[in-house]
Amino acid sequence: MQESAVFIGNLTDIADHDVSRFNVNGLEVAIYRVGDEVFATSNICTHGKALMSDGYFENFEIECPLHQGRFDVRSGAALCKPLTEGLATYRVENVDGRVYLDLSCSNN
Ligand code: FES
């Protein structure tokens, strides 16, 4: 695990098959849990002023609540219009049920 990783909580405290809003060192981050897998993206839509944590999450896709643009939370890729830009993603580690987020490791 990187020294820059921040403990964000126990896996069992993160809602399963859902998205949660976190503020980590002043950065808005959306955390997605699917069973033992956890993913992290920027919580701010790349299209407008909307929070991914207010969106609809299913099958590794988050749908923006404002214009229904969808992103793949595993890669941050924009999947449909009106999106033209993907979300920043961050590395997450699950160490024996303790979840760490590494903000130094982003795709953007
Ligand atoms: Fe998210 Fe427009 S603000 S799709």
Image (cartoon, grey):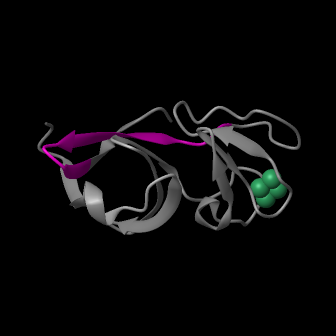
Left or right: residue 102 compared with residue 43: left
Image coords of residue 39 (percent x, y): 43, 43
Quarter where residue 93 is shown: top left
Quarter where residue 105 is shown: top left
Q: Quadrant of the N terminus?
A: top left
Q: What stretch is highlighted in magenta?
A: 86-100
Left or right: residue 99 compared with residue 30: left
Q: Main secondary structure of the magenta part?
A: strand
User: Residue 17 magenta-drawn?
Assistant: no
Q: Which of 97 and 53 is in front in this view?
A: 97
Left or right: residue 7 compared with residue 46: left
Image coords of residue 12 (percent x, y): 28, 60
**At 83% from the left edge and 35% from the top edge, which residue is drawn?**
80
**At 20% from the left edge and 48% from the top edge, which residue is drawn?**
5
Image coords of residue 62 (percent x, y): 66, 48
Q: Nearer the viewer, residue 90 or 31?
A: 31
Q: Nearer the viewer, residue 68 or 14?
A: 14
Image coords of residue 20 (percent x, y): 48, 64
Question: Where ligand 1 lies, by quadrant?
Answer: bottom right
Left or right: residue 18 compared with residue 2: right
**At 47% from the left edge and 32% from the top edge, which residue is drawn?**
107
The relative height of residue 105 versus residue 69 in the rendered view (above or below) is above
